[in-house]
Image (cartoon, grey):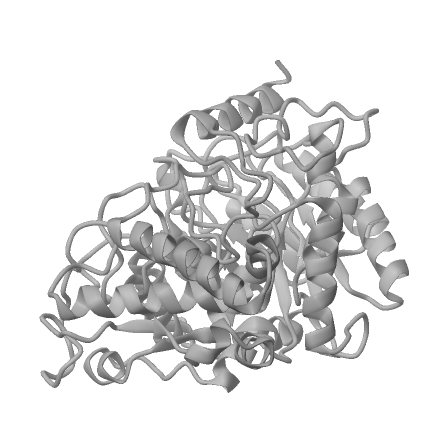
Amino acid sequence: MARRDDGYPGLPIKLNPCSNGEFVPRPLSPLVREAMRRSRADAERHARRLGMSRRTFLLSTMGAATTLLALAACTKEAAESGGSTTSGSPLRTGSPRGSRGGGPGSTAPGGTYKLPEEAATDPDAAVAALGGQEFIFDVQTHFLDANHDIPDLGLSTAFPQSRCGANDPRECFSLDKYLDLMFTKSDTNVLVISALPFAGSPLNPEVMKRAVDTADQLCHSRRTLMQGEAHPSLGTIGQLQANMETLHSSLPVAAWKTYTHLGGRGWWLDDHDPAAPRVGEAFLGKVRELGPNIVAVHKGFGNGSPFADPVDVGPAAARHPEINFVVYHSGFDVQGSRPEGPYDERDDYGVNRLVTSVTKAGVAPAANVYAELGSTWRALMGTPEQATHVLGKLLVAFGENNVCWGTDSIWYGSPQDQIQAFRAFEISKQFQEVYGYPELTPRVKAKILGINSARLYGIEPVLTTCRIDPAELDKARQISYQRSGEGNFTLGPINPAHVRAVRANEQRALTGG
């Protein structure tokens, strides 16, 4: 990997290829490459005009505004020229409601980033546009234990960008770094520590509990929740139930996390396949017995496994209305070359799979299925038209009260850029009319960013704890980055070789080899 320029911290809206380790990131599209080129040139010009160093400018909210404005301009130009605004082939068309503008053949982008031009050079305008005062609840976050007494199994060193200046690269993914990136370097108020996809991982329940206690002590309030991991097809049903009982009785489990395609043989929540382990009903029955009644299930990013398909979510949710299902990644996948388009029930692809599953099972919007955006939003930030279709489909299928914010950080570094981009994102009027998507108003965004998950987890959305004035917070983040020598860098794998290294280490963790 090319050596970094110490004076260049990277663009503040991180559009570069990166993965959480569960998929091979797509290469940059021509549109995104051009947006990044313009962003760097604009940053250079703005910094000189303001008498700032390029590094200082790119660590400011003005730098973030500059990048989003460039991306919006490139998206608009691509639409006007008749080119594709997606990262792959031309946008696949569906069955629009009407014929008035914004649909196939339109010269207007379906989604964009809206903020004033002066936000690129005026710090007050930048903070006003991207600062926000929402309650932000991130329901999918990760870190690794840096305690040298616990084997690392190569998981952190397999990530190629584990170079935060520490002597041991594991420190780049440690609890201290995690809390710094999530709470100091982003606007996140409350978060959930998500279990990793295999038993015996370096992020064991005791480590998660220590993280919960540490964060609560630092912030003087309940700011961090943890999940209990369950692997129903690994071992016997009795062992599964006993392990869940132990976790429930000894740790503050706020939800159950499971992977139907990892951590053992593939299985289904609804036990619809007699050839697969019939463990779904036993797992959900134990959730119902013990509580809490929240199951976070990974669906999407399956590396080709059929068990990552969300086909089982709808039937399981219909059978268990007392359990809330938070569907991590919302069934999104980046392995195919096709972009996301409008919903078509005949098309068993990406997010469509989840929508079809709940619709056919009769699970209504605002019921007991929640669509989560971890890694999905990050993968779509550079393709506003695809982002529009994904958000639009989810809002129609699940309602504005059942779409949840998650970032899958700290694999992507601080999630602040994801938050800022989401604040500025809008669905065009044309796509609202043609495809029936709702307007992405500040009220709807606030629900997605935190209110929905606060209600689900029973957390009071209080903004006063560990928060300061947005302008002061922006300055504090710049100082923190300057002192640490860090930049706007991602931490996860960035190409196929890096992803293979992560998967190889995960397999060794699973087998003990």
Viewed as shown, does residue 174 lie left or right of 285? right
Residue found farthest to the top: 513
Front residue of this view, candidates 91 and 245: 91
Q: Give 508 or 84, whichever is nearer the viewer.
A: 84
Q: Is residue 57 above or below residue 26?
A: below
Q: Quadrant of residue 188?
A: bottom right
| Callout count | 0
Give the residue displayed 47% in from the left and 29% down from the top. Answer: 2
| Residue 217 placement (x, y as % from top left) | 90, 59
- Judge by depth and name the residue closer to the eye, 19 or 368: 19
Q: Looking at the picture, does residue 418 appear above or below residue 177?
A: below
458 relative to 426 in the view: left or right = right
The image shows residue 451, relative to residue 22, as above or below, that is: below
Q: Where 63 falls versus 141 (above or below)?
A: below
Percent across and percent down for residue 41 are 40, 56
Residue 15: x, y in percent?
42, 52
Q: Position of residue 16 (x, y in %)?
A: 43, 46
Q: Is residue 158 visible?
A: yes
For the point 54% across and 74% down, the residue is: 130
Q: Quadrant of the C terminus?
A: top right
Q: Is residue 440 left or right of residue 442?
A: left
* Residue sitting at x 42%, y 35%: 276
Q: Is residue 325 visible?
A: no
Picture residue at 35% right of the left edge, 58% below the top: 38
